[in-house]
């Protein structure tokens, strides 16, 4: 069909924010909904500490964390949470790292070039694929990403992680927590940031520790200097305050209130399962579109590994033509920030977490087809 026979669709998404980070705010979001009593107050005051403690406790409750798992708020988003984990815990055992997209490869760089650990096994895969998890050694520490935000590829399950492991598992799950089922008993350290699935504000990370992770922290002292913002122990014991609302450095109380608002919204939906279902419904819309159009495909090579949050797509166009599509959709105020990540293959990346409405994804797809036909025709 020619471009002339493809008039612009009449319906636009009510919310064109499909960025993969920071992600769309929840439906109905308004700054007016946020509590302001904590603003201008010390985060160590009774009021500030209570808000921070509630953020930790509500996160644990909504995620149904196993008994003994701790939730802490740390600096520098998911990156900060991952790096303080690696600097604090790695060293006593060999390390297996599984990486298949940009951020996973950053953890490879940290371990091999910054910490300079020697006994490291790297298992890597190209965009769209997963590495061979069966190579994981139960006696080693394991680092992996649950969902590749820049590749649109997610881990299917954690059956490959031994229940009798001697090492600890460190999982970067920033685009998975609150959107995918997490096998907590298999995971000793989990990190995420508010700015992803819950559409929170940036600069803060969340660190979840299992009892096994706490044991590692209390039994091992790294040989390298530790910056203050990385220190999770005091006098050889876990700094419990971090997991009870006493953050390492001063947090933004406005961001904390924003996060509490997001958690309240999750509960109003019906909790974690409702969040996951909403995200999956968004992916289903794109799945049907891909099935009916042979010029667009998922970057993920197998259906069971397609992410339901950061959905990455390739098109049968040149890289500059894909950029034209992205520009057209932004000019039409249909979709913002949906170009693929700078290191990823050219394509589209559409956020489908639960803060995005299914009706907006449905409205977006005809516009993608319109832009494709327009660019294809030149």
Image (cartoon, helix red, strand yellow):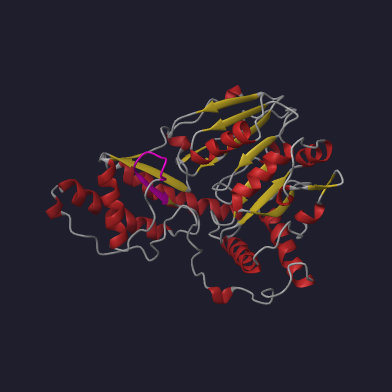
Residue 359: x and y in percent read 39, 60
Residue 300: which quarter of the image? top left
**Is residue 74 something that shows in the picture?**
yes
Is residue 2 found inside the magenta-colored segment of the image? no
Q: Nearer the viewer, residue 139 or 44?
A: 44
Residue 186: x and y in percent read 68, 36
Residue 203: which quarter of the image? bottom right
Q: What is the magenta range?
A: 341-350
**Is residue 155 something that shows in the picture?**
no
Q: Residue at x 64, y 65 (%)?
A: 252
Horizontal side of residue 97 vs 60, given as left or right? left
Q: Residue furthest front?
A: 225
Q: Residue at x 71, y 57 (%)?
A: 56
Q: Please identify the dominant SS of the magenta region.
A: loop
Horizontal side of residue 372 vs 113, given as left or right? left
Residue 103: x and y in percent read 53, 41
Q: Nearer the viewer, residue 211 or 238?
A: 238
């Amino acid at each position: 069909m020619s471009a002339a026979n493809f008039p612009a669709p009449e319906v636009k998404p009510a919310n064109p924010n499909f960025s993969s980070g920071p992600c769309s705010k929840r439906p109905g979001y308004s700054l007016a909904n946020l509590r302001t009593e904590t603003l201008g107050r010390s985060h160590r005051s009774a009021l500030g500490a209570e808000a921070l403690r509630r953020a930790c406790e509500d996160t644990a409750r909504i995620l149904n964390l196993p008994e003994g798992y701790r939730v802490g708020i740390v600096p520098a988003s998911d990156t900060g949470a991952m790096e303080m984990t690696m600097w604090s815990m790695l060293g006593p055992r060999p390390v297996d790292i599984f990486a298949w997209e940009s951020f996973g490869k950053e953890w490879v760089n940290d371990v091999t070039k910054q910490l300079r650990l020697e006994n490291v096994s790297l298992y890597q895969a190209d965009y769209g694929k997963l590495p061979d998890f069966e190579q994981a050694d139960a006696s080693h520490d394991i680092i992996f990403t649950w969902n590749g935000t820049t590749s649109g590829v997610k881990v299917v399950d954690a059956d490959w992680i031994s229940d009798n492991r001697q090492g600890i598992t460190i999982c970067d799950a920033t685009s998975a927590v609150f959107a995918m089922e997490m096998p907590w008993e298999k995971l000793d350290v989990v990190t995420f940031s508010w700015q992803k699935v819950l559409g929170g504000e940036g600069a803060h990370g969340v660190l979840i520790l299992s009892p096994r992770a706490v044991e590692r922290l209390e039994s091992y002292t790294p040989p390298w200097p530790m910056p203050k913002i990385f220190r999770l122990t005091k006098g050889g014991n876990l700094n419990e305050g971090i997991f009870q609302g006493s953050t390492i450095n001063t947090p933004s109380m406005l961001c904390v209130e924003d996060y509490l608002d997001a958690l309240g919204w999750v509960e109003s939906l019906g909790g974690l399962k409702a969040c996951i279902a909403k995200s999956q419904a968004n992916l289903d819309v794109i799945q049907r579109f891909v099935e009916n159009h042979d010029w667009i495909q998922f970057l993920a090579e197998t259906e069971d590994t397609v992410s339901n949050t950061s959905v990455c797509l390739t098109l049968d166009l040149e890289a500059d033509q894909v950029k034209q599509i992205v520009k057209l959709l932004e000019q039409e105020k249909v979709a913002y920030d949906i170009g693929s990540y700078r290191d990823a293959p050219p394509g589209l990346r559409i956020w489908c977490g639960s803060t995005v409405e299914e009706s907006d994804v449905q409205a977006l797809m005809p516009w993608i087809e319109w832009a494709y036909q327009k660019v294809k025709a030149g």
